Every structure is written in C-alpha cells, then in structure tokens.
Image (tube, rainbow, N blue to C red):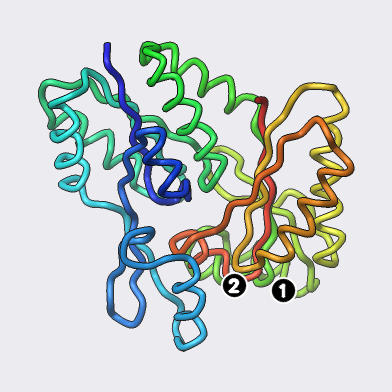
Amino acid sequence: MKTVIVTDSTAYIPKDVREELNIHMIPLSVVIGGETYEEEIDITAGQFYEELKRQDRLPTSSQPSSGQFVALYEKLAKDYDAIISIHLSSGISGTYQGAVTAGTMVEGVKVYAYDSEISCMAQGFYAIDAAKMAAEGKSPEEIISRIDELKASLRAYFMVDDLSNLQRGGRLTSAQAIIGSLLKVKPLLHFVDKVIVPFEKIRTRKKAMNRISELIGEDASKGTALKASIIHANREEDAKEWKAELEQLYPNVDFSISYFGPVIATHLGEGAMGLTWTIK
C-alpha cells in the first residue's frame, strides 16, 4: 500500500524538508488589515512580525476550507492508496475536522485524519517520522502506531510575554488571563485534552525557561534518547543561546530550532518561547 503524508502549515516544517520527505502541506491563513495571506505561501514568519509592528489591531486566523483538502486529496489519489493527514489540535482549530470531512468526499484513496492534539514542531515530529516510514513502505496502521508512540512520550511547554492575545483569540479563558495580568507572571502553558491551559505560574521569563529546562532534564536523566525543538516567536538569537545551554546540560538530546509562524503567533504574540520533546 502506497502511503503519503499531509500536514498543515502550523507544523512549520521547512519547505526543503517537506520536499525531501514528500510531505504535502495545507495552509492556514492570517487576516491582516483586511487582507488574507496563506502562511508559508503568501507570508513568512519574518514578514508577519514586521507587519505586526504596523498594525493597531491583532490579526485573525482562519482554517482551510474542505474544498482545499478535497483538491489535494484528489490529486494525491492518482498516485497513492492511503493518505495520513496530521493536523493541529482539534481543541483550537477546526482544521482536523475539515480533513475528516474531506476524507469522506474523496474516492479511490483511504484518508486517515490524525488529530495531533497540539501544534508547531510537536506536530512536525509526527509528520516527519510518518513520512520517513511511508518512504520505507510501512502500512498506515504501522505509521499511526508510531505516531501514537511519539504522542505518548511527547511533552511541550511554552510561555508568552502577554496573555491578552490568547484570551482575545478565545484560546485561553478570561479568568486565566486576568490572573496572569494581575500577578505579572510568565505562566508556563501546555496542552491538556487538546486545549491550552496553565501549567505553572512563574514570575520571570528567565525562571520560566529554567523551569522548562528542569522539565526536559527529568526525562533526559532517564537515559532515553530524545529529540527536542526550541520554538520561538521572533526571538532567534534567544533560541540559539538557549539551544547552546541545553546541549551542554543534556548531551543525549538532539536539539533543533523551530518557530511560531503567523497563525500560531497571532494567538501567542511576539516573544513567545517554547520547548517540545519526544523519544527519538
């Protein structure tokens, strides 16, 4: 059975990696000043952050249409028997449901929609491993079993400079946002049951990053080989410095750097920083 992998733009897998691994991408969009841009196609992360400085209103984001999914699936159906379509958490976007719906509308190919229950490079880890296995001729069931294994061991924590973006975008409740603003905290956030919730309340950015370092240290100390990605919102130098620190502390972890692109940064805001890791 010939299988191909689809994911969406919020995995933020670089284009050259997608092309090398034959990963197909469905873009989500951001609306800035009344103009709609497909992320990773019409607008890069760098362009988005530059545009943010000129706007007095927060951008909004939108999911792909079912028609976009159908068009891609029909194209892939000409060459493949199965599609594994891996998408950002259904708790923060309707993208996964769009994949499910489109899968019922396409003939000649079996579509396996997969809810990553997260986003960004955590989701990217799933798509990359899945694509490597697809290239080896593994079955959809074998590939999904591997993704489930990654998901079971995956951890991800992130912090934002300002909770108001998350609150206004409906990704965090008003009560949680008010608590954060009153205490001037830099809360660590994570995904639980597909949605973003606070993990711990921490006073400063540096302490928050140190706490994340402690958390990966708990897993790294078990001796298991891990892969990890530092994810930043227009803070590349900070990410590089943090990577160097973490590599010294945890030599058995393979660290990389990724980013919060336009759609996710619309909700997290500039300056957000996170770390995700799972088994190799």
| Tag 2: amino acid | Ser
Q: Contact, CB < 8 Å: mark 2 with mark 1? A: yes
Residue 242 image position (x, y, % from top left): 79, 55
Q: How many marks?
A: 2
Quarter of the image containing the N terminus?
top left
The 10 Å Cα crowd at callout 2, few under 14, some 14 to 19, many 20 or more, is some
Q: First in sequence: mark 2 or mark 1?
A: 2
- Residue 33 falls left or right of residue 104: right
Q: Secondary structure at mark 1?
A: helix
Vertical order, 191 against 262 (above or below): above
Vertical order, 142 against 250 (above or below): above
Residue 169 image position (x, y, % from top left): 47, 66
Q: Residue at x 82, y 46 (%)?
A: 246
The answer to which quarter of the image holds residue 259 is: bottom right
| Tag 1: amino acid | Ser
| Residue corresponding to mark 2 | 164
Quarter of the image containing the C terminus?
top right
Q: Residue at x 41, y 33 (%)?
A: 21
Vertical order, 48 against 39 (above or below): below
Q: Residue at x 49, y 15 (%)?
A: 145
| Residue corresponding to mark 1 | 181
